[in-house]
Image (tube, rainbow, N blue to C red):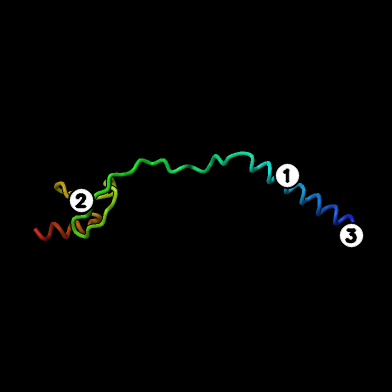
Amino acid sequence: MGIRLLLILLTLWALFIIVRAYIRRFPKKDVKKNNKIAANMVQCKVCGTYLPEAEALQHQGTFFCSREHLMQRKDEK
């Protein structure tokens, strides 16, 4: 019984080593490299936070990070 269990464990260990070596041979294809183009950053006129231009709110050529800051700036005028 003991020898049989030992042989099963050694076989499983050998299979594990072989499968692991086989998997490591191939590069991972699902890992995407971060090749994004840098976004143009703009500064919020109220708080000075920088954020991508695509995410910023714009009013009369001025950028804001949130609707609250946009409304705050409008109220000051």
Q: Looking at the picture, does residue 22 appear above or below residue 65?
A: above
Question: Would you say 77 lies left or right of 42 here?
Answer: left
Residue 2 got which mark?
A: 3
Query: Pointers 2 and 1 in contact (CB under 8 A)?
Result: no
The local secondary structure at tag 2 comes to strand
User: Residue 67, relative to residue 28: is it above or below?
Assistant: below
Asked if residue 45 is positioned above or below residue 37 in the image, the reply reads: below
Amino acid bearing label 3: Gly
Q: How many other residues sit within 10 Å of disc 2, few (<14), some (14-19) or many (≥20)? A: many
Q: For marks 2 and 1, give the one nearer the viewer.
A: 1
Horizontal side of residue 6 vs 67, given as left or right: right
At x 23%, y 56%, the residue is 67
Q: Tag 3: Cα neighbours inside 10 Å, few (<14), some, or many (≥20)?
A: few
Foreground: disc 3 or disc 1: 1
Quarter of the image with the N terminus in it: bottom right
Q: CA distance from mark 3 to mark 1?
A: 24 Å
> For mark 2, what is the residue?
63
The residue pinned by badge 1 equals 18
